[in-house]
């Protein structure tokens, strides 16, 4: 038993483990998904029907492009104004979103 050589464990390469792995064409897909929202008209966030319609447009776009919805994407759907998300959500939910997304 003392004659057995134990191989030293090596840690995985941190640079490789922490890098974002994308396939060719992924960046184009993400950019095109975001660029569609740039052409959308402005929304009055004080009008619940307009907010509801915009959220529907955003989720439909995510489904069409097979993309996972995100808070950042939702903010972009409302013209990239992160404060808009906080004005729509109840106070407790907005605080929770802020902690998770670091707006």
Image (cartoon, rainbow, N blue to C red):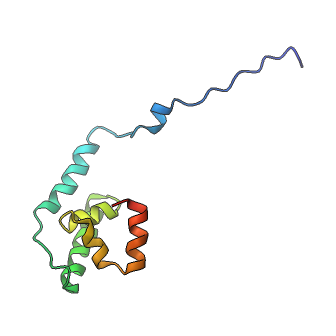
Q: Locate the C terminus and report the quarter of the image it occupies.
A: bottom left
Percent x, y of residue 57: 22, 71
The residue sitting at the top extreme is 3
Query: Dividing the picture into quarters, in which one does residue 70 lie?
Result: bottom left
- Residue drawn at point x = 83 percent, y = 17 percent: 4
Q: What is the tally of numbered marks visible in this picture?
A: 0
- Residue drawn at point x = 34 percent, y = 78 percent: 89
Percent x, y of residue 90: 37, 81
Percent x, y of residue 97: 39, 68
Between 23 and 77, the one nearer to me in the picture:
77
- Residue drawn at point x = 38 percent, y = 60 percent: 101
| Image vertical order of residue 94 relative to residue 4, above or below | below
Percent x, y of residue 20: 39, 40
Between 64 and 91, the one nearer to me in the picture:
91
| Image vertical order of residue 8 relative to residue 71, above or below | above
Q: Locate the N terminus and report the quarter of the image it occupies.
A: top right
Query: Dividing the picture into quarters, in which one does residue 67 lie?
Result: bottom left
Between 80 and 1, the one nearer to me in the picture:
80
The residue sitting at the right extreme is 1
């Amino acid at each position: 038993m003392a004659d057995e050589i134990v191989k030293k464990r090596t840690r995985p390469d941190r640079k490789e483990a922490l890098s974002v792995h994308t396939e060719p064409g992924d960046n184009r897909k993400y950019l095109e998904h975001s660029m569609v929202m740039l052409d959308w008209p402005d929304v009055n966030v004080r009008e619940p029907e307009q907010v509801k319609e915009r959220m529907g447009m955003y989720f439909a776009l995510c489904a069409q492009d097979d993309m996972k919805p995100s808070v950042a994407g939702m903010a972009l759907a409302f013209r990239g104004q992160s404060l808009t998300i906080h004005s729509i959500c109840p106070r407790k939910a907005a605080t929770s979103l802020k902690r998770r997304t670091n707006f």
